[in-house]
Each structure stands twice: as C-alpha cells, then as structure tokens.
Image: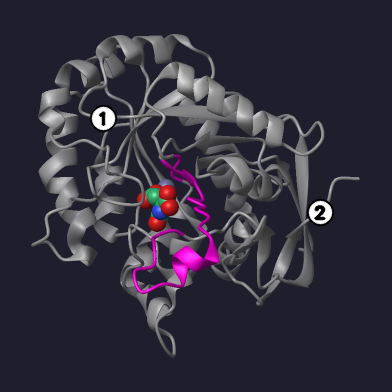
Amino acid sequence: MDKISLPKPDDWHLHLRDGQILESVIPATTRCFHRAIVMPNLIPPITTVDQALEYRHHIIEACPGDCGFDPLMTLYLTDLTTPDEVRRAAAEPHLHGVKLYPAGATTNSESGVTSLPDLMPTLEAMAETGLPLLVHGEVTDADIAVFDREAVFIEHVLEPLIEALPALKVVFEHVTTSQAVEFVKSAPANVAATVTAHHLLLNRNAMFKGGIRPHHYCLPVLKREQHRQALIAAAISGNSKFFLGTDSAPHPRSAKESACGCAGMYSAPVALEVYAQVFEDNGALDKLENFASRYGPRFYGLPVNSQNITLLRKDWQVPDTIQAGDEELVPLCAGETLSWRVQEEQ
Ligand code: NCD
Ligand code: ZN
C-alpha cells in the first residue's frame, strides 16, 4: 500500500504556546489535524473560560489561510478552581476539558493541584456536567523514581478518584507504561487514554544514544522497551479507549540544550507520519484510521471530520530545525528520513 486516505485526524493533546512560537508551530498541526485539544499550561495558566476563549482567538488568528482548524480549549485546574467555573466551561461549546497537572509534575505546572481530595466539589461538577478531566498521571514525590511516577500515580491517585467519582470522564494523557495500559483497559468506558508518537517510536535508550540527548527528554519520560511494546499493542489493538494525542510540546532550542534542559518534544511536523510508520512496522496500518480519526471524537462526543487527508509513501528528510522568530525549534526525527508524508492540500 502506497497511499492511505482517512478522515482528517484530530490531535487530542497538543501544546501550541502563544505569540511567536504559536505562529511558527500552528501550520505543522493544521496540515494534518482538523481539531486539537489545546493544553492550558501557558504562563500564566489558562484558568478561566474567558482566558480560554481569548487564547482560542489568538490561535485562530495565527492559523494559515482559511484552514478551518478548530481549537478545543481546556482549563488548567488549580487549587482554586470553582464548581461554578466548571459549569461555565461545560456550557461553553469551545471548552472540552479540564487539565490536572499535579503541582511540579512537568513544564509550567507550578500552579497545578496540591491536593486533589480538596477539589471534590469541583470534580463533582465535572462528573455532573460530563466535562472530562485530562490527567497528567505522575506523582511528584521526590522519593519516587522518575521512571515509576506514572505507575505509582495510578495506585495513589487515579484508582481512588475513579472509585469516588465513577461517572467522571477521564483521559489518562500520554500513557507511557504497561501499568497504565492495563489500568485503562480494565477501567470503565468513561476512562480513555492518549498515546504519543514519540512514546510509540522511542524507548528510554534514545535519551542516551552516544551522549545525552536533550531533544528526547519529555515528561512522562521515555520508558523501557517492554513498556513501548505495551503502548504499541494498545494503539493497534482496535480498543477505542486508546487514541491519538501527540503531546507536541515546542521549546526553543536554547531552553532544551541547556544544563537544565526542559521537558517536551516538538513532534507536530512529523507526528502523523511517525504514527503511520509505527502502525506499518507492526502490520497494523488498517488500524490507523480508527486510532487517528474516529476513537477520539467518539470519546469526546464529537462528529468524525468530513474532510479527508492522504498519506503517501514517499521518502523525505525532516528539517534539522524550524525557525520561530529569533529562536530555533528542533523537531522530533530532525534530519532523519521518514517514509510516509501527508499530501499537501491542492
Ligand atoms: C509539556 C510542555 O512542555 O508543556 N512537556 C512535556 O514533556 N510533555 C508538558 C506536559 O505535557 O507534560
Ligand atoms: Zn502535554
């Protein structure tokens, strides 16, 4: 097969930032995704419906031409998020979720939640209104190894949460371990997960290949090969609880190549192509359409996109860098040759 046509996919977990970076990264997303769940971890974070709608406006303004891109906005859950704000969000058609960052878990999570049990009334309002909780699933305890933080989060936070609020819709974002896959599979239908292209493509050795590789550092951190295999099995299984979310997270090169490089991989320029490659390498190209275009809308209660896109088998070289004003961004697979490419719109 040299050509795959599918309904235009959506990205169910994306960082677009604002300002110059937003302008520089948005075309890579709109070329192959019709909608995206846009993460709210700006500085300052997007904590109110009004802020989310204003941010949405920036994104639409930065879009190339009349691409029709539909940003699906989210609120950043803090210790102060009220049930009223949740109800306002649930009533607003452009708001689609509330993001839980445990305080200190990842990039721009300083305003995140310090005690989830104290937010019960707010979470109850989400369960009542059907607004999904989008979870960065890692504990932050300094005495838990970085590689174990997701597995421990399941036991310490997610299991009790789902038991306390069985109706709450939960997306376990960017799952990285076999424990997360097993948990999502055995949870009720209102619990789903996104899977990134980079966690399907790379295991943790990629961070240390011939030296320290800051562009392969993200959170949750890359895991062992056995976990990557569990993610691939979940993504190609045809289980509708697992769908596409790139977690494309651009940072200026200077912030990545530093004594304390920040977390996040900029994958949007190659993400759909990498998913196609991984599905093909695992004999499951026929499963790509559901994973990329159908299971996400089904979980979020939205229609499948009516427009189609085409992936062509065609070798192409990923650029080493992408300019963002005075800064450079280094994309995932920089300088490498990929064998699938999204056909440019005519
Ligand atoms: C994300 C970012 O840079 O905003 N970084 C990352 O490593 N994935 C935040 C996040 O999703 O954890
Ligand atoms: Zn993210």
Query: Which stretch appears magenta?
Result: 239-264
Left or right: 113, with 118 as reference point = right
- Name the quadrant containing residue 266: bottom right
Q: Residue at x 41, y 27 (%)?
A: 97
Closer to the camera in the image, 329 or 68: 329
Q: Residue at x 70, y 30 (%)?
A: 61
Mark 2 or 1: the one toward you? 1
Q: Say whether residue 244 is magenta.
A: yes
Real-space Cα distance between discs 2 and 1? Answer: 41 Å
- In this view, the residue farthest toward the left is 143
In the image, residue 73 above or below residue 102: above
Q: Which mark is residue 343?
A: 2
- Name the quadrant containing residue 166: top left
Closer to the camera in the image, 243 or 102: 102
Prevailing SS of the magenta stretch: loop
Residue 259 rendering spot, x and y as whole percentages? 36, 74
Task: Look at label 1 and name its amino acid.
Answer: Thr
Badge 1 crowding class, 10 Å Cα cut-off, few under 14, some 14 to 19, many 20 or more, is many
Task: Look at label 2 and name its amino acid.
Answer: Gln
Q: Say whether residue 134 is magenta.
A: no
Q: Which residue is mark 1?
A: 78
Q: Is residue 174 visible?
A: no
Q: Residue at x 70, y 70 (%)?
A: 319
Judged from the image, the secondary structure of the residue bearing numbered disc 2 is loop
The C terminus lies in quadrant: top right
Left or right: 56, with 145 as reference point = right
Left or right: 119, with 48 as reference point = left
Q: Earlier in the sequence, mark 2 or mark 1?
A: 1
